[in-house]
Image (cartoon, rainbow, N blue to C red):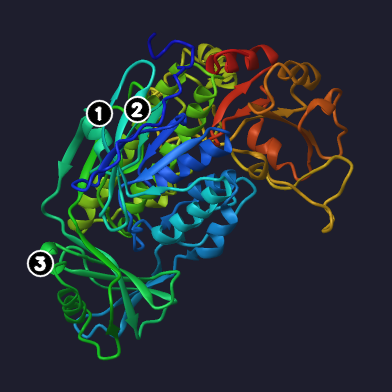
Amino acid sequence: MTLGEESRPSYPRPSRTSNRPDVKSSIYTVMSREPTPVLIVGGGPSGLVLAIALLRSGVPVRIIEKTWVPRLGQRGAGLMPRSLELFTMLGMIEPVLKRAICVPLVRKYKLPEGVDVLNEFAMSPLADPTPTHPFLNLMLLGQDTLETVFHEELAKLGCSVENGTELVSFKQNADFVEVNLLKRGPKGDQEERETCRYEWMVGTDGAKGVVRKQLGLTFLGETRLVENFVVGDICVEGLSPKYWHMWGEASDVLISLRPTETKGLYNFIIAGKDINNAELAASQDTIRDCFRKNTGNRKDIKFGEMPWMSYYTPNIRMVDAFSKGRIFIAGDAGHVHSPTGGQVWFFSPIIDGVNTGMQDSFNLGWKLALVAKGLASPSLLNTYSNERLPVIAEMLDQTTKLLNSTFNGGSAAEWQNGGALFQLGVNYRWSTIVMDERKSIEAAREAEEDALMEDFEFEDDGDDEKIDSYGTGFDGRLRAGDRAPDSSGLIKPGTSMKPFNKSHQLFQIFTVTRHTVLLFADFVECDEILQDLQRYPKDLLQSVVVVRCKRSAPSGSNLADHVLEDHDGHAYEAYTSSVCGVIVVRPDGIIGGILRGSNSLRRYFQNVLASP
C-alpha cells in the first residue's frame, strides 16, 4: 500500500511489556498500549494549537515536550489580527483578549541625557473594527501566558502535555510511524524508554528540533553574523507602563523597553552593530550596565531582575517541503526569519514563531482530521506543503528586506502600511483544492470585452496568475483561496435589531471542525442544494442560508443548520456579485469554493473528500 491509497492503516493491539530496572539501572523499556492516531512532538504554540484543533474534531492526540521547565518570558508577544480571528474559530478568543494588552504609544528619548522626549508615535496606529474585519489591531500577550491559555483549553478537552518526554528516533513505512521515546522524571533521576506506533506524527519542536533533522528535510537559507540582538524580560521601576520606551538607533545601539501584561515587567531588546551580544548576555549585571549607559544614566530608573534573556543571531531559513510520508513539521521547525526593519521589526520575531506557525497548524489540522477519521484521501495532505510554502517564502523575502532596511537607516513603511504583516491578505488562490467559478465567469466576460477592444492598444497588466501569497497586489475582488470575511448584523428572520434581540456574526458560526456552506438565497436554489448536502455526515459540514433584509426564508430552509437575515447587508456586500451564490468556507477560515450550484458543490467535495 502506498501513502496515496484511500484506506486507513490498521494495527494489532500491542501488549504492554516492560523490563523493570535492576539495582544498577534506572532505564527500562515499555511498549505502548493502544496508540492514538497522532503524535505531536513539541509543546509550543504551533503544537498546542494543532492539538486543540484535532481534539475538537474528535481526533485523539498525544503531545510530548522534552523539557519539564515551562518556557519563561514574552518571546513572541505580538498577536496579529489574523491570529485573533483563528482564536475565535477555536472558541478561545475571550480568555486571550482578557489577558492581552494593546500596543502602547512609543516614546523615543533624546540622548545623551535620555530624559527629554524626542517624539511620540504609534507603533501600530489603532483602527476601528469593520463588519468584515472585527480585529484590525495588534495585541500583546507573552508567549508564556498564551501557552497557559492553551493548556487550559487542552485540559477542557481531556488532554495535557507530557513533559519530560523526548523523541529519540523514529522510522516510518506506508502504514505507520514507529517512535522511540525517552521519558525522564522532573529531576532527571529516572528514565523510561518507550516504543510505540502512530498513524501520523507532527514535529513542532522548533528550529533545533529532531524531527526535521532526522526526516532529512533541507533547511535552506543563511545565518546573519552582522546584526546583533539581545532580548529578554526585566523588572523596571520608574517608567510609565503607558508607553513603549526607546533610546538610540539600530544602526548604532538601540534600547527598547516595552511594558507587558505583568505589572512592572518590561520586555527588552538591545540591538545594533556596535554591541557584542554574547558578551552582553553573559550576565544580568552586564545587561543592566548597558541599559544605564545607553539610556543616559538616569537615576530615576531602577533595573531589577531578569526572568529570561537570550542573545539572537538572525537566521533566515525554510524547508523545501513540510512533510515526508506520514510525518509533518510546522512552526519554527519549518521556518525561521530575521527581526526586521523600521517600526515593524519589533513584531516580526513573533510573526514567525507564533502567528505564522499557528497558521501552519490551522492549515494542517483540518486536513489531518479528515484523513485520520477516514473521511478523506491521504493525498489531501499533499496540499499542506503546496499551500504553505509560497506564504513562508514571501514572508522570509519581505522580512529580510526590512532587516536590511533597518541596519542601513532606511524605511520599511511600504510593506507595513499595506497591512501585510497583519496577515489578513494571506491566501491560497493557487491551491489545487480551491474552486472558483465566479472567476471563470468573469474572465470569460472580460475576454469578450477584450475582443471587442482588440483594435485598441493597452498596456499589459502582466500575468494575473502569479502567486501573491500575501495579497498585496489584489484588486479587492473576493476569490476562492482568500480569507473568508466576517459579517455582523445577522439576525433570525422575523426578528429585529432591537437591543434585546441577539445578532450574529459569521465568525461566531465558522468552526475549525467543519466546512461551512453559505447559501445566498438571491442567487441559488437553496432547496436543491440543501437536499444534496444531506448525503454528507453532519460532523463534516454545516449549512447557512442568508436572506436579504425583510425577505422570507426560501423553500427547504428547514434543512439548514442556520437561517439568517442580512439586516445590514454586510454579508451580501462582502460575498456576492452578480453570479455564484454558494460559498464554501474551510475549517481554517479560507474560502474553498465560490460556486454556482449543486453540481459544482459536489465536485468541490469530491476533490477534498475520499467519498461523498
How many numbered discs sit on the rendered protein?
Answer: 3
Reading the chain from its start, which is encountered first: label 1 or label 2? 1
Q: Which residue is mark 1?
A: 215
User: Is label 3 in a helix, a strand or a loop?
Assistant: helix
Q: Residues within 10 Å of mark 2 (few under 14, many from 20)?
A: many
Q: Position of residue 18 (x, y in %)?
A: 33, 35
- Residue 327's disc number: 2
| Residue depicted at 46% across the width and 33% down the height | 363
**Mark pair 3, 1: CA separation:** 35 Å
In the rendered image, the vertical position of residue 133 relative to residue 146, given as above or below: above
Disc 2 marks which amino acid?
Ile
Q: In the orientation shown, which residue stands out farthest toward the front? A: 23
Q: Position of residue 579 (x, y in %)?
A: 67, 22
Residue 108: percent from the left, percent from the top?
Answer: 31, 74
Disc on res. 279: 3
Q: Could you give the CA–CA distance between mark 1 and mark 2, rounded to whole angstroms?
A: 8 Å
Describe residue 423's horizontal placement relative to residue 440 as left or right: left
Q: Amino acid at mark 1?
A: Leu
Mark positioned earlier in the residue sequence (3 or 1): 1
SS type, badge 1: helix
Whether label 1 touches label 2, CB < 8 Å? yes
The reply to whether callout 3 and callout 2 are in contact (CB within 8 Å) is no
Identified at 28% across, 77% down, the residue is 305
The type of residue carrying mark 3 is: Glu
| Left or right, 577 with reference to 372 | right
Front position in the image: 292 or 16: 16
| Spatial separation of the CA atoms under disc 3 and disc 2 | 39 Å
* Residue at horizontal 65 percent and vertical 28 percent from the top: 539
User: Is residue 397 among the parts visible in the rendering?
Assistant: no
Q: Is residue 11 left or right of residue 89?
A: left
Mark 3 or 2 closer to N-term?
Answer: 3
